Image (cartoon, helix red, strand yellow):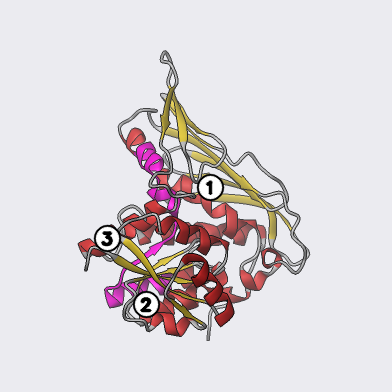
Amino acid sequence: MDTTVRWGVLATGGIAAAFTADLQGLPDAEVVAVASRTPASAKGFAGRFGIPRAYGSWDELAADEDVDVVYVATPHSAHRAAAGLCLEAGRAVLCEKAFTLNAREAGELVALARSRGSFLMEGMWMYCSPLLRRLVELIGDGAIGDIRTVQADFGLEGPFDSGHRLRDPAQGGGALLDLGVYPVSFAQLLLGEPDRIRADALLSPEKVDLNTGMLLGWDSGATALLSCSVTADTPQTAAVTGTAGRIEFPRGFFHPESFVLHRAGRDPEEFTAGRGGGALHGMQYEAAEVMRCLRAGETESPLVPLDGTLAVMRTLDAVRERIGVRYPVDVSPA
């Protein structure tokens, strides 16, 4: 592969714009095409970011041989179809989170990518953050001893009306897949897949979760208290406590610029890292990891492993089972 990696962007919403802006801050990345289901939307996005090719269908982008990797930025209800289309066409794929609507769909995408030897990664940008990687190093070095508790929350005030996608079961509505995926992924980054899962939620009239609390447990004795909401602007913080100290993240733990390490008998230590590279959102780190993998001929990222993505999806499925949220796609095809 040449030094420059050529990207296609599939979808034109807010997350696609944020990613594209950050991507254009990387000197070895080039956005060469964008696709939407409507030509006008694709052309408008292309004009905004100076992208040479705008497609009015996903198929055209998937078939573009000049695209090395496609960033799938649709709502998660379309991830299975969009990412699958691109993988079938031979494109590498970075797919936003939540990765899919359920673990079955996630398993299908992973199996497809592995059978074709194609690169696939979940867009869990938090995992590629230099500060999250430093957190993992510190914990691995025993800085806070054995983990005993993890706490994390992510909530937005709302309200979202009944016609919004967050209220629609067919579109994977609710707080859990949009926001809860971050606290769950944070906990599982540090502790792996839980051995026990409890959950409770406030449901909407459409039977999607508006406010959800989760208690995860591990045989090690560690627990995680996590929450997500589309009815309340929560602190959006995280903390990890061990037998020898704790680490606290301020608001915005999922795209951190700092955290503080507390240990008995020592002054607090602050760790900081800017978002770097002139980027606006901090999403360039996941893009850089994708490009590193492609140049190295790797089909999976060690920072965002597919087995970890599958484990998170299993946890999200288990939480939904416990709170009574079911999507139409959960019914296995005949």
Mark earlier in primary sequence (3, 2): 2
Q: In percent of the image, x 23 and y 63: which residue is there?
A: 3
Going from N to C along the chain, the mark reached first, 1 or 2, is: 2
The residue wearing badge 2 is 87
Residue 35 shown left or right of residue 330 in the figure: left
Q: Is residue 38 visible?
A: no
Q: Which residues are magenta?
A: 107-136
Using the numbered discs, state the Cα–Cα distance from disc 1 to disc 3 in whole angstroms.
26 Å
Report how far apart the C-alphas of labels 3 and 2 lie in the structure. Answer: 16 Å
Q: Residue 230 location in percent, x, y? A: 69, 53
Q: Amino acid at mark 3?
A: Cys
Residue type, mark 1 in image: Pro
Q: Which residue is mark 1?
A: 183
Q: Which residue is mark 3?
A: 293
Outermost top residue: 265
226 falls in the magenta region: no
Give coordinates of residue 44: x percent, y percent. 56, 73
Residue 78 falls left or right of residue 266: right
SS for dot 1: helix
